[in-house]
Amino acid sequence: MNVIEKILARKSGRKIVAPGDVVVAEVDLMVMHDLSANFVMKVFENEMEAARIVDPSRLVFAFDHNFAPATREAAEALAAVRRFAAKHGIRNLFDSGCGSIHHCIMEAGLVAPGMVVIGCDSHTTIYGAIGAFATGVGNNSMAALGFVHGKGWFKVPETIRIDLHGTPGRAVQPRDISQYLVGRLGEDGAVYKAIEFAGPYIESLDVPDRALFPLQTIDVGGKCGFINPDEKTVRFVNRLLESRQTAPPFELFRNDADCRYSEVIDVDVSRIEPQVACPPTVGNVKPVEDVAGTPINVAEIGGSTGGRLSDIRTLARCLANRRVHPGVRLQVVPASRDTYLAALREGLFEILHLAGANIFPPSAGSNQAFNMGALAEDEVMISTQARNFPGRNGHPAASHFLASPLTVAASALTGRITDPRTLEDA
C-alpha cells in the first residue's frame, strides 16, 4: 500500500484497503475559512436539530478572506462565526490578520503526518506535503458527518505517480513546474485520483516548496496529492510541533516498495521554461514567452500559492534599488503573521516600500476580491494566486494571469508580462 492507502486503512479500522474500496474513516482535523465556516455553521444550526459537535478540538476556523470587513453584512458574518465558536467551545479560531488559512494552520503545528484532514476549501490537499491524507468536502458533509461524528467517507483513490528529475533552468521556480503539470495533465486529467509527486527534483525541495504540488492537485481534478515522507518531512514537522505544548506523537506512513500505480508519468524539469496560466482557467498554461508583452495593471505576491517568506525575498531581491512601473499597482500579501514578522525583521518591507509596493495584512489577498485587488473591466493582473476564473477578482471581463514570484516581480518592473530570464539578477 502507499501512504494514502495506509492512512485510510488505519483510520477506518482495516488492515488493508485497495483502490475502489469505500471506507468510513476517523477525521483528525476539520478546517474552514471564514466563508465556508459561515455556510457550515448555518447547515448545522438550521438543518440539524439538537445536534452536538463530537469534538470541538478537531475544528479550525481561519478568517482569511474578509480580513477587514468592508460591509455591515460581512462584519455580521464574521461575528456570527465567532459566536458559534464560543458557544461550542471551538478554540482553534484564527481571527482576521492571521494569514492564508492553510499556511497559518500548518505553522501552528495542527497538522501532522498520518492524519486525515478535511476542509471546505479545495486546496486542503496541501497537507499531503507532510504525509497526511487531506481533501476537500462539501458543507453538508462537513456539518453532518464531520461535526457530529468526527468521520468522513471516502472511496480509496487510484494513484498516479509523477517522477520529476533534472535540474531546473535559469529563473525556473517550483511554481513554474507545478503549474506546468496542471497544463500537461489537464483540468480533468486526474479526476478522483491520488497523485504522488516523487523523484530527485521533489526530494531536493524544502517542504514549503514541495507543498505547491499537492496543493494544486485539485486543479487537475485530483482527490488528494502527497509526497512520500522523508527526513526533511520529519524535521519540518518536529520544528512546527515544538510550538505546541501538548502536541501528540504522530505516525509516519511510507510507501511499500511494491505499491501499484494506475499511471507513472516521467517529467524532466530541465526542459520546462517559466510558465504562465492564462485566462480563463488554471489549466490554460503556456510558456511565458507566448504572452510576454501583455500590459498589466496589477501585480500581486500572495494567496494560498504565494506570499511565503521565500516569495517576498525573491521580490525584494529583484526590486532592490529599483521602482515598480508607474502603471502597476504591486500588492504584497504575507501568507501568515510569522511570515510578516520575519519579512519585517529582515528589512524586506522597507525595500519593497521604497520600490513602490503596497504591503497588506496577512490574508488570502485578492482571492475573490473581498477586501482588496478587485479589477475593473479592462484591467489585467498577474499574481501568485491559485485561481484566475472570470469574475473571481472583480469584473468578469478582466484578465488574470498566474505565475511564479520571479515572473510577477519582473512584470511589476516593466509594466508588461515579462520573461524573468531577462532580469540580470534572476
Image (cartoon, rainbow, N blue to C red):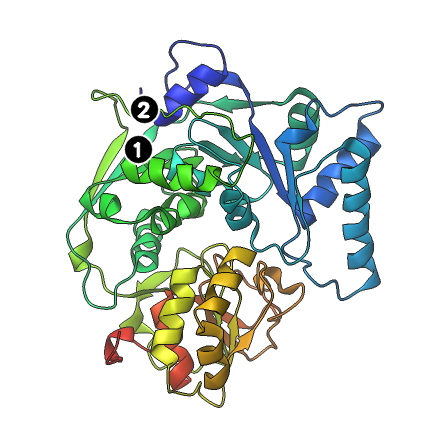
Image coordinates of residue 353 in percent, x first then y, are: 50, 81
For the question of whether residue 336 can be seen, the reply is no
Rendered view: 250 above or below 204: above
Q: Which quadrant of the figure contains the N terminus?
A: top left
Q: Which quadrant of the figure contains the C terminus?
A: bottom left
Look at label 2 and name its amino acid: Asn
For the question of whether residue 115 can be seen, the reply is yes
Look at label 1 and name its amino acid: Asn
Q: Earlier in the sequence, mark 2 or mark 1?
A: 2
Give the Cα separation between the discs numbered 2 and 1: 8 Å
Residue depicted at x 81% and y 46%: 80
Secondary structure of the residue carrying numbered label 2: loop
Task: Return the residue nearer the eye: 23 or 77.
Answer: 77
Based on the displayed image, in which of its 4 quarters is residue 346 positioned? bottom left
Rate crowding at label 2 as few (under 14), some (14 to 19) or many (20 or more) other CA atoms within 10 Å: many
Task: Return the residue nearer the eye: 23 or 294.
Answer: 23
Residue depicted at x 44% and y 85%: 324
Q: Which residue is mark 2?
A: 2
Q: Which residue is mark 1?
A: 228
